[in-house]
Amino acid sequence: MGGSSKQVTGYQYFANFLLFIGNPIEKLLGINFDKRAWQIGERISFGSNGEMIYIEKPNLYGENEGGVYGTLRVKHGTNTQTPCTLYKKYLDENGLPVSAYPYQSYILFGGGGFPQGAYGLSEAELEAVGDELEVNDQYYNGGFYLGNSGYMKEMLLWPKRIHIKNDYGPQWYDAKAEVPDLTNIVDYKNNFEINNDVPYQTFTYYFADLEIGYLRDELFRGLPLSDGSGSNDAQGDVSNYKQSILNRVQGSGFLQFEFIKVSYLITYHTVEMDTNVPPGLEIFEHTEEDVSSEYPNTSGFKARRVTYICRSSATDIGLDMHGKYGFDGRFKFDYDFVINNLDNHQTPIYANSGDINPIHKIREILTDDTAMNKPEHNVNVANFVKAADRVWDEGLGISWAITEKSCIDAINELCSHIEAGIRVNRQTGLYEMVLFRDDWFKEDEIHTLAESKIKSISFEVQNADDVVNQLNVSYYDRNNIKNASFSISENASIKNMQGRVNAESSDFPYFMNQRNAAIVAQWKLKQFTTPCWKGSFTTGHNQARKWNRYDIVKLNWSRKGIADLPVRIMSINLGDGVDNTVSIDFVEVVPFSDELTSTVVIDDKIDVTPVPPQPILFKAFELSYFEAVQAHGQRTVDDELAYNPDAGYVAVVAQRSQNNSLNAQMHTDAGTGYENSAVIQYCETAQLDQSIDRLASSFIVKKVGDLASVRIGSQIFINNEIMVFQGFDAASKLLTVKRGALDTIPKIHADDSVLFFADDFVAVDSTEYALGEAIDVKALSTTPSGILDLSGSDTQTVTIHSRAIRPYPPANVKINGQYFPIEIETDLILTWVDRNRSQQTGGEILGWFESGVAIEANTQTYLTLIELDEANLVLASNAVNVTGSSSYTLPMSSMQPATRSVQIVLKTTREGYDSYQYFNHIVELSTFFSAPYNLTAIVNEI
């Protein structure tokens, strides 16, 4: 009988951990693991103490990678929330203080499942179950299943905070706080049969015989829908041949508070036609369009397209169409009915969530104690309500997650999203919103200024060639979890400019869909392409002192043929108390309501088909002493180098090649074949937009990654130089750095050179290599479907120089007071500062141009000066030990007569190891091409 053996094929990983979200939230709409779709889970409410979410997706990452399952205890950040029982138990066992973290939202990931008896319970019954689970710490034992690999995959959270303030108080003007997202819908089409009894034979009633479409069940996903019912109702004076008919089309089985788009075409012959909205149906948008011209053969019947965006508090959606007909006895309702139901109707928790009204967000920034902390009575309530109503009607909701931003910048960005401005009314002292719309100001609110009251006026000349006729628009595509873009062009302007396109960029990072970005982009493009007056004028008109920024003034100036020109005040200056002349900058008001002959070109949608592993951009290098200390600790590194000072380690940084790749594998070959040496976590990257010299500390970059996530003060690897990240301006793409950090010196870099923002994402091969070894390195991207083949990756070879043991070179080297001069005219005067490898292991990393520190113990500084003739042949060489000094002078008088240039080599040496890099520069002598500088003149009197 044969035996059997067991083989371990893999591990499953579980963990209990606490994940902080931040400030208070209303709810967690969903969680997305590794961008594998939003998970809603089964939920049990704990009332004001949060909720429990059970997620069961054990094969989310695939058969081999596993998935996730367990419970999420979500704390919303109330001031009355209590500690999670499992977390409290852990802290108690370790003698640590327990906190519920009031006003902080967080998630505790733990084990457990959804109680079997909880399925099918009402919300109130589920809350009772939640009360029992709240105190049962045994329920959450076992840990949250994270998959079959030893690392945690990326998680995206979708929190919501709209109807509460930052202190968990009720939202101001809550009825218009949430702007519904009406774009996340799909079309379901069906023709409804209209059945009507006709009691009055005197008149002819006829209705189109519309059959129920055979795809009804498929299109409506099995929702039970009634066929639509009609009834006749005699009203009015029958003797005058006035009759009316009432028809209802109704669908049932919808979710409560689900957004529905109802659209129907009616052809009718009547004197009146209207639609009655049943109680409980909340209308968000209602439009009617006469489309009779599209139906020319209707024998005198009219055609109208009616559209409603609505949400019902009931599960039935019904609309009553009511018509009154006249003497001719003809009446017809012909319904072409379309109901747009939200996709995935069984998970409305996140699908039906709208965005916050930007006006509410602006008001919160003004009044919240964590922002500008203005008293609420300093805000014009009626004005903000008016603005909130208008933006809500326009559907321009926004979403954002801000870690740090100035209040003024935030308000300005929000105003840009909705074409608005904020001001303090100089008469009332209250904050007010001004929406740049045609009808924002009433006629009696518009000022008029006679020409005689204008002291002086100047106009800016607009060059037709400078007209912007195309906007490249970017926004955030929430459905696809990515930034997206499209372009919008004004065709008439392009034609007038003989096809020449002048484009500008317009960013809407807080719009979550293309619809909102397109609406505001149309407004902005209209302003760009419309020739308009702008300039400034002065006036002594007394009433002008009461005007406010963004007010509209009707301007008159006969010399330019201007009469009652509406202009908007962009800035106003009241004078200095001596001269009280009012100075005003203005721009002509461009009507928003006028049509544009524009074209919107949307970028092609990204194919969501899983992408196989792709080659990645990476950089392999020998590990520096600083990185070795960061990875293993200074004592460990020093002990290893004391035992084997020739040792060196190979490291890699890499750029993410595709969205479905969480990390990569580092493979190394020292001559015996490739081995999997380390896991590579991707870092952010950018590319130089132009070449830079050794002195540039700020420069423009392109193809920029998410630099907002990069830590200030972290390392940047570019070619053979290490820089230090100091900041990045996203608008101008200006990157600011320190140059020549650690054991490197500044280098010249060509355009398109790649900058790797290493931060904490350096992968290190733990193998210890010897001086002189050449190690081949490959970086292989990984995806759920596999790993890139070795043949698909480039090979980079790293030669070991025992980099970690070598001292840092001198820095801040100047020649005659200049950095890297081409030539000198006087004696060669060299200055420098020292660096210290063992001292610079923490804190702020020094750049090459910064002041010095004490030199590392047992380190010598050597200066070599090589004199070259016109053919670059060596005439003389002089090596000097300049340890302990910071300057050296080589007089011209001591140089060889034929010397035309001097090569300067400045380096450090410690216990036989030269610095990894060193200063090496050639400077020309200009003495032979200019007047003598050291002649002595003797004047003899006669």
Image: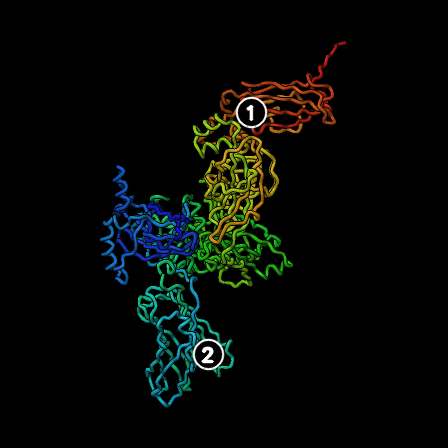
The quarter holding residue 709 reads top left
Mark 2 → mark 1, Cα distance in angstroms: 94 Å
Callout 2: few (<14), some (14-19), or many (20+) C-alpha neighbours within 10 Å? some
Q: Which quadrant of the figure contains the C terminus?
A: top right
Does dot 2 land on a helix, a strand or a loop? strand
At which x and y percent is residue 839?
A: 46, 26
Left or right of residue 866, residue 326 in this image: left
The quarter holding residue 752 reads top right
Residue nearest the viewer, comparing 380 with 8: 8
At which x and y percent is residue 842?
A: 44, 31
What's the mark number on residue 302?
A: 2
What's the mark number on residue 913?
A: 1
Q: Residue furthest bottom?
A: 202
Which of the two marks, 2 or 1, is nearer to us in this view?
A: 1
The numbered mark, 2 or 1, whose residue comes first in the sequence reads 2
Left or right of residue 655, residue 181 in this image: left
Residue contact between numbered discs 2 and 1, judged by CB atoms under 8 Å = no
How is the rendered protein coloured?
Answer: rainbow
Does dot 1 land on a helix, a strand or a loop? strand
Answer yes or no: is residue 383 visible: no
